[in-house]
Amino acid sequence: MVALFLLFALDVAAQSSDAERVGVPEDSVSVKNEVADSTLWAQPLSAMQLETNPTDSTLHRQDYPRFDRSLTYVGLPLILAGVLGRGERHRVYYLHKEFVPEFKSSVDDYVQFAPFALATGLQVMGVRGKSSAVRYLASSAMSFAIMAAIVNTIKFTVNQMRPDNSTRNSFPSGHTATAFVAATILHKEYGLTVSPWYSFAGYGLATATGVMRMLNNRHWMSDVFCGAGIGIMSTELGYALSDLLFKKKGLVAPEKHNLVDLSTHPSFFSIRMSGILGQQRLRTPDSFKATLGDVPFLMQFGTGAMVGVEAAYFFNPYIGVGTSWQLVGHHVKHLDKPFRRPSATANLPEGVTFDFLRTGLNELCSSLGLYLAWPFAPRMSLGGQFTVGRNIFKGISVRAMKEGTVKSGTPESYTDTQQKYTTEWDFLTIQGNKALRLGTGMSFTVAYKQAYSWRAFLNLNYSFNTFTLTLNPSEWKQHEFPDAKNLPNEVITERIKKKLLQLSVGTAFCISF
């Protein structure tokens, strides 16, 4: 975030410097003309100098768009998040398996092109956008070409396996990169010149494409973030190259606002990410201690990671309503301790090995509420929110495996058949539930350019969840003693109510409108 604010400050300084350079010569032109009026022989020379001097940097700035001025860097943090998130990709892998295990759709194959199809359709219908048809096609072609070159180079260099173990070309997501190229084209052509709702629609469809790639079990979350960043930056480069090639030729409609005024455009759509702080613990039920031993706490919530989308519509510069959807991956600590380092009082079955397939617990949250803003400067705003919603905690388990031989009879009296068996089951399961979730928070927003903004936020959320704990220490007996019909049911189930308080600190990439 510090780097983003530095880039923003440098950009503001550059724009202020340009404004000074552009403003001065207009006065000097009038002075020259006034002098020329009193000195007749000097007038043709002054006019000729003003019209033909190729070294006049001021006129050059006015006539031709600058490469560095038209370029934005909003995609870089998303790329960085994707690269840094590769090590944490397994934490949110179970989004597909836990929340929508039956999801399978090819809609994302088509939705990725929807923003570009909309922009092209508007061009064909004659709706005035930023560019003429020729410049639009050139800018779009360069944007897609740059994206394809970058994505495919990385894909076949990194060789990362997909979540479904089908191929080694997962990182980054090509579908998501394509979708964000298409969305950024729509944003530049019509979101900045006609209506910001085009930007909202384009980036909404692009985000939906990325989510569906994960739900289809085709990509990790880090793939999607990096693909989104590459798509945005590829379009920025494509349009910057068009500025160099076409200069002002083919520019049809001017941008309504290059710099966002947050006092008049407080509404937003954002993609956000944060870290979650929380150290709540789940105690070990007394009924479990006969098997697990004298362990005071069964597990502890460690730090977590959150990704999500948020949108708000403001009725005036200060008050609005908004909603958010987010996925939280909680790191779980100490769940393996009773099995890896059992206490002296533990009574674990002999010959059983334990497997910990994951070290995280997923939470899906949604909320709706009141959003507040205080634009204390045209490009800076403080915000607050009061929300109510729901959260859903999914489960985590400890798997057990036992190998043995089948016995004929009962555990008290049997004959060994020497027939081998292998069985696996959930030895311990912790399952969450749905609960009411209350939230509040504050934010600091800095407007960038081309309707982009950056936001730093701090949120506090409270929920009262119930966790169902199930201990099944003797599932193996049904396979070892298949003839025993009256084996005792040793499954133990307990419910623990837990007040969860979560503090999240993070940043968001926003489209302001």
Image (cartoon, grey):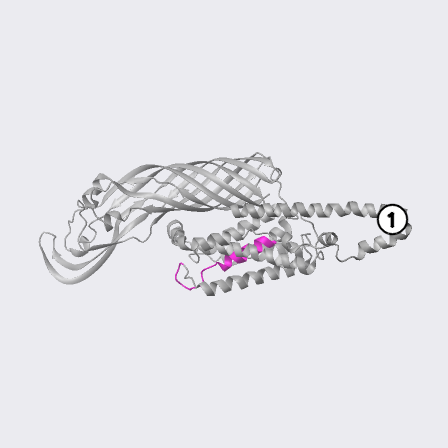
**Left or right of 52: which side holds 513?**
left
- In this view, the residue in front, 490 or 59, is 59
Q: Residue 55: give x, y in percent of width and height.
A: 75, 57
Residue type at mark 1: give it: Ala
Query: Can you name the residue that lies furthest to the right here?
Result: 40
Q: Where is residue 333 drawn, in percent x and y?
A: 32, 46
x and y percent of residue 246 in the render?
A: 69, 59
Q: Residue at x 83, y 48 (%)?
A: 32
Q: Quadrant of residue 119?
A: bottom right
Residue shown at the point (58%, 39%) measured from the top left: 380
Which residue bears the numbered disc 1? 36
Q: Is residue 354 in view?
A: yes
**Residue at the (66%, 55%) spot, across then down:** 123
Q: Residues within 10 Å of mark 1 (few under 14, many from 20)?
A: some
Question: Can residue 200 be seen in the rendering of this structure?
Answer: no
- Rendered residue at 43%/37% (across/down): 460
Q: How many labels does the image show?
A: 1
Q: State yes or no: residue 166 in magenta.
A: yes
Magenta stretch: residue 314 in it? no
* Place of residue 167 in the rendered image (x, y in percent of width and height, measured from the top left): 42, 64
- Looking at the image, residue 4 sits to the left or right of residue 221; the answer is right
Q: Give the range drawn in magenta.
A: 163-185
- 409 relative to 309 in the view: left or right: left
